[in-house]
Amino acid sequence: MGFALSDMQLSSTAFEGGGDIPSRYTGVGEDSSPALSWAGAPAGTKAFAVICHDPDAPLVTPDGTYGFVHWVLYNIPGSTSGLDEGCEDFTSGKNDFGNMGYGGPMPPVGHGKHQYYFWILALDQQVDLEAGLTMWQLLARIEPNLIGMNRLIGTFERS
């Protein structure tokens, strides 16, 4: 499965690209998902999915997955151009905390600054997916319909 970035843009009022994620959006704060907005979706976009993944987490599984997944959200209509802070709309997948919905950044103490990739994925059709998919299951299911994607990277360090 291979993906390439598109011209779509993802931003947040909570933090700038490459900047620090405020603690309110982390596991040591209110653990609320940040507001996100996107623009420039490819023509023909019918649905979106959002993922937050920490590739810096020192976790590799026997099946080859890596990092730590903090958020999996999908079945987002193509008419949507953003998510409010603390969004609980649409369909939640399972994060690596073992919960549904958002689980904010919380790297191990003293592990240094981690990068958190918030991904927006554009699909050419609304794929009706059941709740509880992991990030890896979601990616496998939507890959044939993926027509655009991009990311917003924020950082967080727990001391």
Image: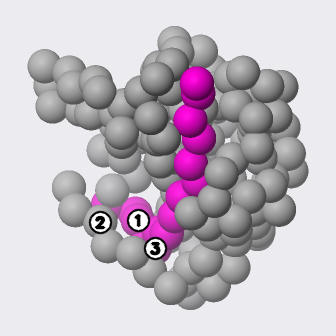
- The N terminus lies in quadrant: bottom left
Q: Secondary structure at mark 3?
A: strand
Instruction: Name the disc covering residue 3, or none.
Output: 2
Image marks 2 and 3: residues in contact by CB distance under 8 Å: no
Q: Are marks 1 and 2 in contact (CB under 8 Å)?
A: yes
The answer to whether residue 134 of the structure is visible from this angle is: no
Q: Residue at x 28, y 24 (%)?
A: 59
Q: Which residue is mark 1?
A: 146
> SS class of the residue under badge 1?
strand
What span is colored magenta in the figure? Answer: 144-159
Q: Is residue 131 above or below residue 19?
A: above
The residue pinned by badge 3 equals 148
> What amino acid does circle 2 point to?
Phe
- For image coordinates 76% across by 35% down, the residue present is 23
- Is any part of residue 7 visible from this angle? yes
Residue 149 among magenta residues: yes
